Amino acid sequence: MKDIIVMAIESSCDETSCSIIKNGTEIMSNIVASQIKSHKRFGGVVPEVAARHHVEAITYVIDQALNESELKLEDIDAFSATTGPGLVGSLLVGVNAAKTLSLTYNKPFISTHHIAGHIYANKFLTDFKFPLLTLVVSGGHTELVLMKDELNFEVIGETLDDAVGEAYDKVARVLDLPYPGGPHIDRLAKEGAPTYKLPTLMEDDTLNFSFSGIKSAVINLVHNETQRGNELRKADLACSFQEKAVELLIRKTKAAVEKYNISQVLVAGGVAANSRLRALITEELNTIEVVLPPLSLCTDNAAMIGACSYQQFISEDFSNMEERVRPSVDL
Ligand code: KG4
Ligand code: ZN
């Protein structure tokens, strides 16, 4: 059978990325241009700044992806891009690039969902075994997604307020750590102990999450200690926060595994890079296969979009040039 080559573009937030994927599972190239440096001084992503950087970087990442894979645009069978969710100005850059290439080379255009991409990053590691459950943990999402078949997503639990990555980033900010804070909390927590008392989260029977309570608890604690002139044990606080956050993620994942008789658990999204989550989830769910993407495929990248769009290619899930960006589209 002829090889199927997909070029995928991801530009939903602060990484401009282009990847070329062969037959859905072989990464021929995966170029990621990060803008983190530019956003650091603002303590978060500034949408206008992000969109401008995407414009500057898009042709560079496409050229690099072609160079690395030693392919030409004529060799590509389909062009795909993340159409949502994400920042509208950022999404538009990647989507317009992919549409233009699709039109120029007369090949299909595929519209891919960012979270579906995070889930499909796991395809580089394993075949999917249904029914499967993905714990999606990113800067904008915290969800439990049930899949009974390819490209069939059912959200069975989600955060009622902040995403876990957002909570990490906000806690990092009150501890004066740089943006994005998740990796810094992860690193600092290893030097501390969970000696600060923080609330246990969402002790209910649902599969939902909530992180705004613990975020506020940490902010209040920092203010109170500062006002009293007490020295803040940052490593201990990072560790105390992380223990509670990870405990909730794992407790709800376990509950979903039991309820839906799951065959395989995947973890997806930027927070899947967290060392404590990675260690504890394999330890706690030891009777089931737990798949964790390598760190480079946890945070935003176009290879994951390519893995998902390959499946869409097989299912002939193509879009036309009318396809719009969808900043807050559901899975
Ligand atoms: O998936 P992602 O790259 O972008 C979104 O789609 O949101 O996730 C970014 C999030 C940020 O909140 C970042 O702080 C968090 O992932 N993150 C981590 C770690 N690495 C990245 N959080 C905790 N521990 C980490 N090691
Ligand atoms: Zn993401």
Image (cartoon, rainbow, N blue to C red):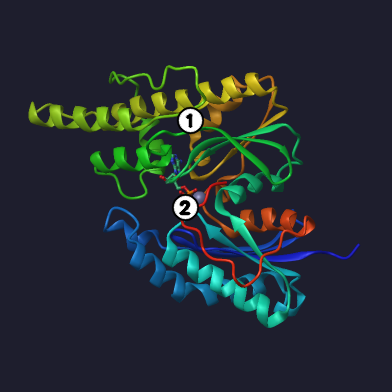
- Secondary-structure class at tag 1: helix
- The front one of 258 and 171 is 258
Q: Quadrant of residue 193?
A: top left
Q: Is residue 195 left or right of residue 149?
A: left
The image shows residue 113 at horizontal and vertical percentages of 58, 53
The image shows residue 207 at horizontal and vertical percentages of 52, 25
User: How many other residues sit within 10 Å of disc 2, few (<14), some (14-19) or many (≥20)?
Assistant: few
Which residue corresponds to mark 1? 276
User: Mark 1 vs ligand 1: CB under 8 Å?
Assistant: yes
Q: Quadrant of ligand 1?
A: top left
- Secondary-structure class at tag 2: loop
Query: Residue at 49% across / 45% down in the picture?
Result: 270
Q: Disc number at residue 32? A: none
Query: Residue at 80% across / 64% down in the picture?
Result: 4
Query: Residue at 76% across / 66% down in the picture?
Result: 5
Looking at this view, name the residue that lies furthest to the right. 1
Q: Quadrant of residue 154?
A: top right
Which residue corresponds to mark 2? 328
Q: Label 2 is placed on what type of residue?
A: Ser
Q: Label 1 is placed on what type of residue?
A: Arg
Instruction: Give how far apart the Cα atoms at labels 1 and 2 are.
Output: 30 Å
Query: Residue at 27% across / 57% down in the picture?
Result: 42
- Of marks 1 and 2, which one's residue comes earlier in the chain? 1
Residue 102 in sight:
yes
Quadrant location of the N terminus in the rendered image = bottom right
Q: Is residue 211 left or right of residue 326?
A: left
